[in-house]
Amino acid sequence: MPQRGRPRGFDREEALRQAMEVFWTQGYDNASLADLTRAMGINAPSLYATFGSKEALFREAVALYVQTEGSGIWEQVETAPTARAAIAHVLRATAEAFTRGDTPRGCMIVLAAPQMQGANAQVCDALKVHRQANGCLLERRLKRAVEEGELPASTDCRALASYFATVQHGMSIQARDGASRETLLAISDCAMSGWEALTGASHEA
Amino acid sequence: MPQRGRPRGFDREEALRQAMEVFWTQGYDNASLADLTRAMGINAPSLYATFGSKEALFREAVALYVQTEGSGIWEQVETAPTARAAIAHVLRATAEAFTRGDTPRGCMIVLAAPQMQGANAQVCDALKVHRQANGCLLERRLKRAVEEGELPASTDCRALASYFATVQHGMSIQARDGASRETLLAISDCAMSGWEALTGASHEA
DNA sequence: CGATTTATATAGTGATTGATACAAAAACAG
DNA sequence: CTGTTTTTGTATCAATCACTATATAAATCG
């Protein structure tokens, strides 16, 4: 019994992708139900029957964003041969992802709801969790590099992770302000050029 | 003829300061007229008679922010003896300003309206102008350092300015996410530790 | 076919949005 | 005092917000 009643007249994933793009460009507050339903090509009752509420739709959109857009940025952190290569890839992939042209500029996780206080504290907090997860991912990778001997034991992995996360977050603002791909790549080069001074691993390639 | 009619029953500057704090914590969209009038201690007609509109009030709040909160961060860029000292001060002052405790965390210019599209494109664009002005300020200071011999002629001042602006912007996100003053100071130290590698001025102090 | 089940479109819910009409209140000028 | 001017509080404006009640449309089941 695959389905009993009237079949759904739209593609759930495609509608969710459209909603994600609206939230990505407009943010959570500024994206109205009218904006969402227009972009998704459905009416409000279909949206609520399928996704539950605006907040639930946003959470699904965030999950889709992390899975599709974010994966290209963070997926190689664990598998990269060195911590240095891992972080360099994160920054370079960020510069490219933020200036793809067919998607909104900057990171949805950073830009969609930066206001902690007010009506949508839970939504903002959900994004904060994602941001901090990325910072922890970097920190864990750096700690592994210390264990493996790539970096000296004196390395302040927490500080380094916060630093590179800060650069990655700041690139969202730059991208929204119109920075070109070349500019963002130059920024990531600047961030990486201090690697030896940061880690004391001047003997590493 | 100092005044003709009924005198104003509240302090204009104090009310503006309260409005600034609401916009700072909640952002432009999320700050409702009810939030603003409650914090300012006045009713809506007084607000409109004094400031014109919500957008005009926001612009005045931004100007007040730049003048009061932002000055401590950017005022020494021109007067600092070296570009290195200037930028180090910007980052250190940023770490302190974003964690003062009695003011909201992070930069109002970065956090109050990051959505370019939608209802408030003009408001967002006004903030973008301020952000880019800071980047240009850094770039001009770096170019002066090249002219004065502090930095080699090969220095890419545009890229360096974008890089440090990116770090400064990213610190707003970190501050909103709860980063401590020590963490932000460590981030600024990380950003500065690559100075020699970035500028090729390894012989400078 | 009729019965059931699910999705759709229309229309409208109360609440809140930014912004005002209006008249009383509080100062001055004459 | 009587006008004039400006601010104030109350009460409200149309528009929009997120959300839903209701009835019809479109499918399967028996």
Image (cartoon, coloured by chain):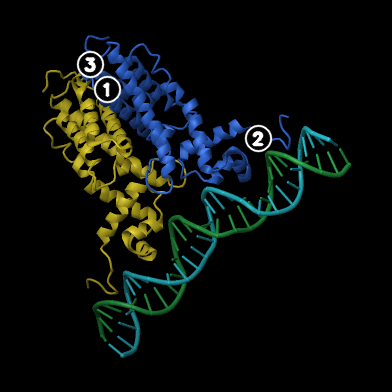
Chain colours: A blue, B yellow, C green, D cyan
For label 2, the SS is loop
- Mark 1 near mark 2, Cβ–Cβ under 8 Å? no
Q: Residue at x 33, y 28 (%)?
A: A165
Q: Which mark is residue A153?
A: 3
Q: Residue at x 30, y 31 (%)?
A: B166
User: Residue B77, located in which quarter of the rendered image?
Assistant: top left
Which residue occupies the foreground of this view, B179 or D1?
B179
Q: Amino acid at mark 1?
A: Cys
Q: Amino acid at mark 2?
A: Phe
Residue A48 rendering spot, x and y as whole percentages: 59, 43
Mark 3 and mark 2: Cα distance apart in space: 55 Å
Which residue occupies the foreground of this view, D2 or C13?
C13
Asked whether residue A185 appears in the rendered view, the answer is no
Q: Earlier in the sequence, mark 3 or mark 2?
A: 2
Q: Is residue B171 left or right of residue A130?
A: left
| Chain ID of residue with mark 2 | A
Q: Is residue B76 left or right of residue B116?
A: left
Vertical comparison of A176 with A183: above or below: below
Which residue occupies the foreground of this view, A99 or A109?
A109
Q: Amino acid at mark 3?
A: Ala
Q: Is residue B150 left or right of residue B30?
A: left
- Category of crowding for the residue at label 3, using alpha-carbon neighbours closer than 10 angstroms: few (below 14), some (14–19), many (at least 20): few
User: Residue A74, located in which quarter of the rendered image?
Assistant: top left
Mark 1 and mark 2: Cα distance apart in space: 47 Å
| Chain ID of residue with mark 3 | A
Determine which residue is flagged by label 2: A10
Residue A202 rendering spot, x and y as whole percentages: 21, 12
- Category of crowding for the residue at label 2, using alpha-carbon neighbours closer than 10 angstroms: few (below 14), some (14–19), many (at least 20): few
